[in-house]
Image (cartoon, helix red, strand yellow):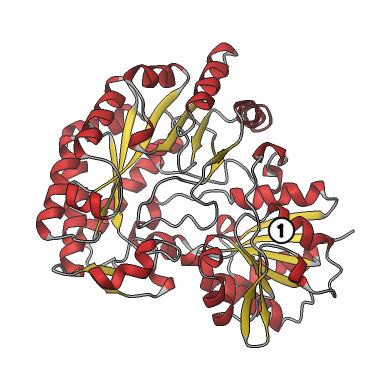
Amino acid sequence: MKRLVLVNPPLTMEERYGNLAKAGSRLPPLGLCNLAAVARTAGVETTIVDAPARGWGIEETWQAIEKFAPDLIGITAVTISVFNAAALARYIREKGHPARIVLGGPHVTAVPEDTLQRFLHFDFAAIGEAEDTLTELLAWDGTSPLDGIAGLAIRRGDEVVRTAPRPFIKDLDRLPMPAWDLLEGYPTAYSQSAMRSHRFPTACLITSRGCYGKCTFCDVSCFGRKPRKHGAEYVIRLVNDLIERYGVKDISFYDDNFLDFPSRIDAICHAIIDQKIDITWSCDARIDTIRSPEQLEMFRKAGCWQILYGIESGSQMILDEVKKNVTLDKIREVVGWTARAGIAVKGFFMMGLPLETEETMKETIRFALELPLTNAHVTFATPLPGSELYTTASKYGAFDNDWRKMNMWSPVFVPHGVTAELMEKYKKKFFRDFYFRPRIVATYLRNIRHPRQALSLANGFITLLTSLVRRGR
C-alpha cells in the first residue's frame, strides 16, 4: 500500500501576525483534511503533519515525516509560508529521503513558474483544486511521463511547464467528508480570535469554492470566479458530524461567500431550525449577498450570531478603483439591517489601497466609527500573487515584492503620496479610536461566555496595547 504524508510547514505566529502574534488565530488546515480524505478513499495510508499547530520547526517536522516513511510528500503553502515550505523540502532532500515532494496551495497556483524556478527541491507542483490531481498522482507508476496528469507544473530541462488545466470540480458533494481525525487534538488544539468564537468547542468549515467578485486585491487562482457549493444536505451532514464526534457547539464558515446561494442558505437555516440542531455560527460575506432584513432575522433564528463583511475603505473613490462594486450607502444599509437583527457585525478594512491618501485614511476611520460594528479588523493592503494588484501595483505606488513579508501586517505596498510611516500611524489610530470606546469595551465584556474566551480576550487586549506603543511591526 502506498503511503502519503500531507504537511502544513512550520510557520511561527510571529511570522504570520507580526507583533500581534499573541492575539492571532491558529486554524486547522482544512484543505489537507479534504485531500487526506480523498487519498484514504483511494486506499492510500495517509497522515497529516501540521507543524504550526504543534509548534514544530523543521527538524521536528522532518522526524514526523521520516517516521511515517511516505512514498509521496505533499506540502501546502500560502505566500507567507512558501519559503518555510522550501526550506523543509531542502532539508528532506539533504536527509536523502527518496519520496517525491509535491507543492500545492494558493501561492504556487498563482505563480507556478516563478515558484518552481526559485525553489528547486520540489519535484513538481499541483495547481488549483488538487483532489483529482492527487488521486491520479497516487496511481502514477513513478516512471511514466507526468504530461498525462492535468493540473501539474513540472520541470523540463531549465523550464517549468504546465500540463493541461485541471477542470474545476462541479459536484463538490462527491468528495468524502474531511479527515478531521488526522489532526491531533482537534478541535481544541486550534483557536480563533476571542471575538470569532461564541461557544466552545468551536470549529471552522469551508462549504463552497470560488468568488464572482472582481476585487483587485484578491487572488482567486485556486477556485476561480464561478462559485460552486456543497448542497445544504451535505453541509448539515458536516455540522452534525462535528457535533456528534467532537462536541462542537459553534462553527465559523470561512467561505469567501457563504451567503452567495440564496436557496441553499435558506435550506440550511430551515434544517437547523426544524431539526433543532444545537449550533451557533458566524460567516464571512459580501455586502451584496444580503437581500433583506427578513433574511437576516431568519439567520439569527437559525443560530447566526455574527457576520463578517469586507468593507475595506470609507472612500467611495477607492472602493470603485479596486472594483469592490459596492457603495458606502449600501454598506450603511446592510450593516444597519444586520445589527438591528441582533447579529454582531465585524468589518474588515485595509490601509494603503490604490489611491490612498492621508484624507482617505481619515475617511475610513470616520466611516468605521459611524457604522454599528461590534468588531473591526484592519490590515495593510498587500498585492498577493495571483491578484490583479500584484501586476499593477507599480502603477499606484512602491511595491516590495518579497514573499516573506506578505503577512498583511507589514506595509509592502505604499501608494504614491503617502509613506509607510503614515500608514502605520493611521492603522494604529484606527485600532485606538475604534476599540477604546465604552460601547465596544462593554460589548466585549458582555460577550464573555467561557474562561478560554476570557483568556484570549485578555491576551488580545494586552497585545493591542503593546502594538500601539511599539514602532513598526
Instruction: Tell me if residue 56 comes above or below residue 298 in the rendering.
Output: below
Q: List x then y, in percent, for residue 203.
A: 55, 37
Residue farthest right in this picture: 1
Q: List x then y, in percent, for residue 302.
A: 48, 19
Residue farthest left in this picture: 359
Q: Residues within 10 Å of mark 1 (few under 14, many from 20)?
A: some
Residue closer to the observer: 98 or 116 = 116
Residue farthest front in this picture: 164
* Viewer can see residue 463: yes
Please give the residue where the numbered disc 1 appears in the rendered image: 133
Name the quarter where the N terminus is drawn.
bottom right
Q: List x then y, in percent, for residue 41.
A: 81, 46
> Left or right: 237 with respect to 66?
left
Q: Amino acid at mark 1?
A: Thr
Residue closer to the observer: 248 or 340 = 340
> Left or right: 427 with respect to 284?
left
Residue closer to the observer: 63 or 196 = 196
Q: List x then y, in percent, for residue 441.
A: 23, 35
Instruction: Tell me if residue 105 comes above or below residue 236 in the rendering.
Output: below
Residue farthest bottom in this picture: 158
User: Which residue is located at x 61 percent, y 63 percent?
Assistant: 127
* Viewer can see residue 412: no
User: Which residue is located at x 69 percent, y 59 percent?
Assistant: 6
* Residue 397: quadrant of the picture: bottom left
